[in-house]
Amino acid sequence: MHRFFIPPELLTNLATASNATISPSQESSRNVVAPLAGAREEPAPANVVAPARGARPDLPQNILLPKGLAHQVRDVLRLNIGEHMLLLDNSGDEILATVARTSKTSVEVHLLERRPGKSEPAVRIILCQGLLKSARFEWILEKGTELGVSTFAPILCRRSIAGLEDAGPAKIQRWQRIIQEAAEQSGRSRLPELLPIRPLNHALNDIPPGALAIMPWEEEHSLTLHDVLNAPGNVGATLAVARPAPAHPTLAQSTSAPSTFTHPPTIILFIGPEGGLVPEEVALAQQHGVQVVSLGSRILRAETAALAAVANVIYELEHSD
């Protein structure tokens, strides 16, 4: 079944307008379709869709899809009236809907049921990725989303290619679109967060309490990722490092972050750029409590190391019982 993220305010507007009386001309210009004449007018809390079991058949709940999504449903996927889809409002729920009506300019869907979406991984992963060339970084965003990364934090390192830090609004929007499409494809009901590009030392200063920070490095030959993740009391342990309060959006202040990082456990992975991390950067990371690990005997490309580390962390911690 096709899955689509929609602006949460579409559902808020739906609930707000359910008690309002609007004329046909007003109705055509809004995202909300008014109840049929004679339908019971009962206040509905914002952002709530009546479940299928016990849903009132005399109170249809319809919305018009945004223009871009309507084009995809009508002209690209060619969904017919009566076909089902899942709408996602980034709340963790999914909303079962069916195509109710289409025209050359719009698609109207009928909302059937709100239900819990697929759960997120048992571990929260923040991927601090040294900026790479565009195609490789976008590949990490796509595949990292599929694997279960919660937050992407692009970082500037000593060997980052000059000019990558100048990511304009168009590129940021492209990155967010890649994340959204990967989340829809992989069945996630929450979007990973994309933080602003920041220098490595800023990300190190903002490691949140309770997180376990790990940095794979090809020069480390003794301590492995498996060793660190399975060390007694390691996951969820508080890093005893004093840090000043940050002035900009940070790892600790990311909107999807819980107030403490003990449950679910939070892992921060620091991955270098194409040229790798220099010894000075690794030493600085260690001063901030980051544990430097090996991913094996082979030297991996940056994008391979990132996804291998993410996959291993999720596997180790979701199967640690």
Image (cartoon, rainbow, N blue to C red):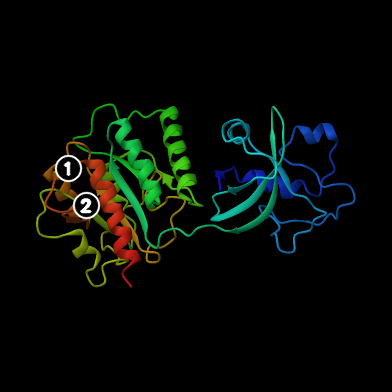
Dot 1 or dot 2, earlier in sequence: 2
Against 288, is 129 above or below? Answer: above
**What amino acid is at disc 2?**
Met
Disc 2 is placed on an element classified as strand
Residue under label 2:
215
Image location of residue 18, percent across then percent down:
78, 49
In this rendering, position of residue 84 left or right of residue 155: right
Residue found 25% across the figure and 49% down from its top: 270
Find residue 74 and report its horizontal and vertical position in percent: 63, 33
Residue 307 in the image: state x and y as whole percent.
29, 48
Residue ID for mark 1: 277
CB of mark 1 within 8 Å of CB of mark 2? Answer: yes
Counting from the top left corner in percent of width and height, residue 282 is at 16, 48
Evaluate whether residue 243 shows in this view.
Answer: no
Circle 2 crowding by C-alpha within 10 Å: few under 14, some 14–19, many from 20: many
Identity, as a three-letter code, of the amino acid under mark 1: Leu
- Disc 1 element: loop
The one nearer the camera, 142 or 200, is 142
Residue at image x 69%, y 50%? 111
